[in-house]
Amino acid sequence: MGIRYRSFVYIFVMLLTTVGCSNEKIQNNENSIAKNTEEVAILSPPKLTVSVEGNKIIAGRGSYSWSKDNGDGTTESIYSSTGPPPEFAGKELLVKSQSEVQLFFEEAPSDYEVRIWETDNNKAIPVTDNTFTTTQDKGNVIYEVVANWEHGTATYAFSLNVK
């Protein structure tokens, strides 16, 4: 009975040690995943939300270049390339002609430009206080936004179906 008891205690202690170590690994993995998610968020441009007539959509993010200073003399950078705006514009929003469009960046860019995207000619649109007016033209209109921050440049696109 003494040997069985010792064997049982030994196995029980080993089991507790193994469970304790595996919990530590899980916590370390969770911390690592959270850290990687934060790093990806830091290495990508802010989201752009578009609001028209009370409806909101997230603009599709296109090509961008983004970097962050690690504070130790090194920099991390990421470059992403996409096709033309119609390929990443996302869900279209049905709007009336001459509707007011509001742009909301997660982080305000230092400057940006809004254009009507066309294959031959990209027309710049005047924007005041992150607001502009849709065209009088009927049909699907793709808008492209090119924004600049200290960390880099990003393009966005969204589609409005003007009725």
Image (cartoon, rainbow, N blue to C red):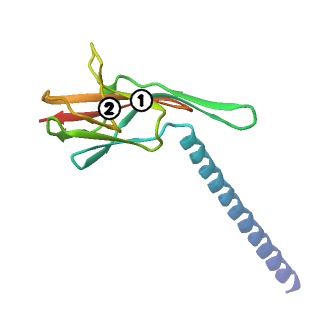
Q: Residue at x 83, y 74 (%)?
A: 10
Q: Quadrant of residue 60?
A: top left
Mark 1 falls on what kind of element? strand
> Residue flagged by tag 2: what amino acid is it?
Val
Whether residues under marks 2 and 1 lie with C-beta atoms below 8 angstroms apart, the answer is: yes
Q: Residue at x 12, y 29 (%)?
A: 138
Farthest bottom residue?
Answer: 1
Q: Quadrant of residue 122?
A: top left
Q: Quadrant of residue 150?
A: top right
Q: Which residue is at the front of the view, 127 or 118? A: 127
Q: Give the CA distance from mark 2 to mark 1.
A: 9 Å
Which residue position holds label 1? 112
Farthest top residue?
Answer: 120
Disc with the residue nearer the chain's start (2 vs 1): 1
Which residue position holds label 2? 127
Q: Residue at x 85, y 87 (%)?
A: 1
Q: Which residue is at the front of the view, 108 or 160? A: 108
Q: In the shown orientation, is residue 103 left or right of residue 15? A: left
Mark 2 falls on what kind of element? loop
> Residue flagged by tag 1: what amino acid is it?
Tyr
